[in-house]
Image (spheres, rainbow, N blue to C red):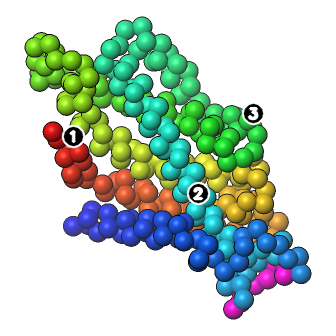
């Protein structure tokens, strides 16, 4: 019962966040990029419900558009990561051989370093920008999913029903579709759901360090970076984007932990 409540709670949070992201132009009262120095560092009021930042930009509007940007970037990264890791992880796990040894050597080298540091290094090389962030994080993150897939495939292909299918000459593609994918899909989906929160943290961290999105773009990490000189005077400039990051990461982590995957196997029925 408790797990079910947490699941529905996380779903509710995510529905709200997705709604905000989709209808950001209708929810935000101002253009998030519009600057008015004469209105800088205003406290919350009827005109600006969360106040303004050091450039006179409406904080609430920037939070709303930051939701759209964070969810969009993290969603694109997850989709690209799964598109790369699924075929690679299943192929090296199923066929093995020299490619599997090369893959293991490659991931062992990369996993000696934290993924955030590797992604940060790539972003630093490629430069600021949404596109470069997507490329850098995807290049690093797919490795971890592929490793999980490879290990699961190695375990599943030793099962008797898989061995029997191979013995009667069933094609590899058929065995993978019928006996491998239904069992690896749910764990990878859960891992992806939980990792969206980590990706949002990475994106915000890059911007906070000054190597993420362009300075004027409405993004939570950039809002934290801009607020550093003023957080003693107006703590809300740090509190609002920090809470937005916390709530979003919490929602995805709770969803991943409570997701039971019911109905997933139906997708693979004849």
* Residue at the image point whose x is 56% and y is 21% from the top: 109
* 208 is higher (above) or lower (below) than 230: above
**Quadrant of image for the N terminus:** bottom left
Q: Earlier in the sequence, mark 2 or mark 3?
A: 2
The quadrant where residue 99 appears:
top left
* 180 is higher (above) or lower (below) than 17: above
What secondary structure is the stretch in magenta mostly built from?
Answer: loop
Residue 41, magenta (yes or no): yes
Cα gap from disc 3 to disc 1, whole angstroms: 42 Å
Cα gap from disc 2 to disc 1, whole angstroms: 31 Å
Residue 187, magenta (yes or no): no
Residue stretch in magenta: 39-46
Q: Earlier in the sequence, mark 3 or mark 1?
A: 3
For discs 3 and 1, the disc positioned in front in the rendered view: 1
Q: Would you say residue 81 is visible in this rendering?
A: yes
Circle 3/circle 1 CB separation < 8 Å: no
Rate crowding at label 3 as few (under 14), some (14 to 19) or many (20 or more) other CA atoms within 10 Å: few
* Residue at the image point whose x is 79% and y is 83% from the top: 42
Q: Left of 235 or right of it: where is 265?
A: left
From the image, tell me which residue sits under label 3.
125
From the image, tell me which residue sits under label 2.
70
Q: Left of 106 or right of it: where is 40?
A: right
Q: Secondary structure at mark 1?
A: helix
Q: Position of residue 43 (x, y in %)?
A: 75, 84
Rate crowding at label 1 as few (under 14), some (14 to 19) or many (20 or more) other CA atoms within 10 Å: few
In the image, 143 versus 62, the foreground residue is: 62
Q: Left of 155 or right of it: where is 151?
A: right
For discs 2 and 1, the disc positioned in front in the rendered view: 1
In the image, 28 versus 229, the foreground residue is: 28
> Which numbered marker is on residue 268?
1
* Residue at the image point whose x is 37% and y is 58% from the top: 255
């Amino acid at each position: 019962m408790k797990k079910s409540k947490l699941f529905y709670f996380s779903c509710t949070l995510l529905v709200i966040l997705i709604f905000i992201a989709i209808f950001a132009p209708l929810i935000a009262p101002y253009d998030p990029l519009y600057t008015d120095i004469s209105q800088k560092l205003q406290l919350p009021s009827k005109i600006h419900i969360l106040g303004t930042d050091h450039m006179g930009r409406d904080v609430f509007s920037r939070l709303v558009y930051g939701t759209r940007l964070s969810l969009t970037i993290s969603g694109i990264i997850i989709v690209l990561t799964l598109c790369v890791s699924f075929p690679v992880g299943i192929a090296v796990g199923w066929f093995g051989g020299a490619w599997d040894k090369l893959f293991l050597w490659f991931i062992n080298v990369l996993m000696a370093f934290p993924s955030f540091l590797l992604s940060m290094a790539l972003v630093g090389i490629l430069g600021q920008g949404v596109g470069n962030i997507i490329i850098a994080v995807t290049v690093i993150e797919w490795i971890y999913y592929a490793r999980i897939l490879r290990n699961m495939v190695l375990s599943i292909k030793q099962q008797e029903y898989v061995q029997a299918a191979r013995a009667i000459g069933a094609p590899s593609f058929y065995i993978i579709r019928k006996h491998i994918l239904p069992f690896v899909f749910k764990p990878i989906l859960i891992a992806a759901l939980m990792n969206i929160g980590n990706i949002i943290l990475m994106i915000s961290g890059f911007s906070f360090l000054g190597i993420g999105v362009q300075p004027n773009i409405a993004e939570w990490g950039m809002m934290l970076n801009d607020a550093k000189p003023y957080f003693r005077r107006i703590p809300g400039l740090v509190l609002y984007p920090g809470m937005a990051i916390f709530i979003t990461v919490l929602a995805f982590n709770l969803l991943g932990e409570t997701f039971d995957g019911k109905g997933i196997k139906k997708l693979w029925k004849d």
